Image (tube, rainbow, N blue to C red):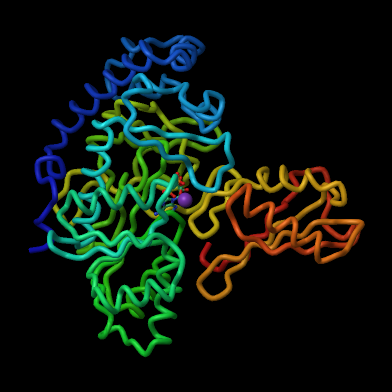
Amino acid sequence: SLSADYFNPAAETMPVPELRALQLAQLQATAERLSERVPTYRAKFAAVGVTPGDLGSLSDLDRFPFTYKSDLRDTYPFGLYSVPRTELRRIHASSGTTGKATVVGYDQHDLDIFSEVVARSLHAAGARPGMLFHNAYGYGLFTGGLGTHAGGERLGLGVVPVSGGNTDKQVQLIEDFEPEVIACTPSYALVLADALARRGHTPETISLKYAVLGAEPWTDTMRREVERRLGLRATNIYGLSEIIGPGVANEDVSEQSGSYLWEDHFYPEIVDPETGAVLPDGEFGVLVLSSMTRSAMPVLRYWTGDITRLLPADNSTGRTLRRMDGIQGRSDDMLILRGVNVYPSQLEAVLAHFTELRPHYQLVLSRSGAMDELLLKVESGRHDPVLSREVVIRIKAQVGVSVTCELCEDGSLPRSEGGKLKRVLDLRAVR
Ligand code: ADP
Ligand code: K
């Protein structure tokens, strides 16, 4: 049966005691490596009074400090690296971020791990050697495109490096090449479904059989819609640049109920968003991940900000690895717009350049058709379309997202009434 089939059976069905022993040994080695080679970690460990020797069992991990996105920013670009820069074979950066952001590097060993975990993910999603893979994740600094590309090749797929955008061309390529597998954001899958329907396609005339969707939160309702309209099975792929990129976890197509974490490389914990205390499996909290086998830039206890829970190990595929539920939201103010990460503070920084604008703004997120729309309302003394156009262009250039800008009367936007001002109005039904 399909479910008894894995890309890496030894890793995916490793007996749990063996897996836990492996994880402990790898975490110990990572803590040693970080303490020896990365001053930031040495300082972080010292600040809470731990040394790698204190990691005697997995339950000791909670004595170690978290790593935050700010630790990467503060050490931009290569301060958290544990190999010389000459060992790097690829650099990526987190999407939607400006110049001084988070830069992640890979040496050859890391690239091998990356393609391995993506190959596992694509295999779990239903892809098999010999299939054609329409890869509509963005190529470039974003980890999505090249990451899934290399994993596809590793699995033995024929990869079509389409990248994002240009929907008409994508439809043409799907018609001409007849790929079986597609990867993109869930919202883009619906855009493609619309475009294919406009060309007269029905689910039966679309060659695609498996969709690997991620980079943004989505729901089962959306899954059913994508599956019905494209005539395929869709699974969730999860990941983040700081850990490796997409392919930290993926659902199995025969099950579609939670994403298998490739736990022999990435150690998961769920913690209380307020206190940081580790929560038992099954409870919702912030996902914290340690990359245990990375060589260029391993991270210990990375605070992903993503809210989810770990699901019980008993499952219908025979894997011994734990699954995580879908991402329910975030513990910080990061927005995900069409797969691109955006912090309101990034938009605020752009607004500050315009003397005509007041520091009062509001972000209204909505969904038009399948795509997210971000309306930026900002108070201004001047109401001319040239100004709002300049704002839109500057945001696109500096933050990488397309917004609509509406200039508002002085005093028309909400002010803080003591508490935390809610600047973001999220009207997307999917949440
Ligand atoms: P990428 O978008 O390539 O996965 P980034 O590092 O730019 O990598 O963004 C990572 C963030 O994207 C995650 O922390 C999470 O918030 C979001 N994300 C990625 N995959 C998913 C998914 N399947 N479901 C929900 N959110 C996701
Ligand atoms: K993302």
Q: How many marks?
A: 0
Q: Residue at x 52, y 33 (%)?
A: 69
283 lies left or right of 316: right
Q: Residue at x 43, y 87 (%)?
A: 198
Front position in the image: 191 or 216: 191
Name the foreground residue: 12 vs 375.
375
Left or right, 327 with respect to 55, comes to right
For residue 239, above or below residue 197: above
Image coords of residue 157 (percent x, y): 18, 58
Q: Position of residue 311 (x, y in %)?
A: 31, 49
Q: Nearer the viewer, residue 68 or 402?
A: 402
Considering every residue shown, the one lying at the far bottom of the view is: 200
Residue situated in front as seen by the camera: 381 or 425? 381
**For residue 55, above or below residue 72:** above
Q: In this image, 206 relative to 272: left or right? A: left
Image quarter hosting the N terminus: bottom left
The spot of residue 76 in percent (x, y) is 52, 27
Could you tell whether 95 is left or right of 122 in the image? Answer: right
> Where does residue 189 sit, x and y in percent of width and height?
40, 69
- Residue 427, located in which quarter of the rendered image? bottom right
Q: Residue at x 51, y 52 (%)?
A: 329
Q: Is 189 located above or below residue 350 in the figure?
A: below
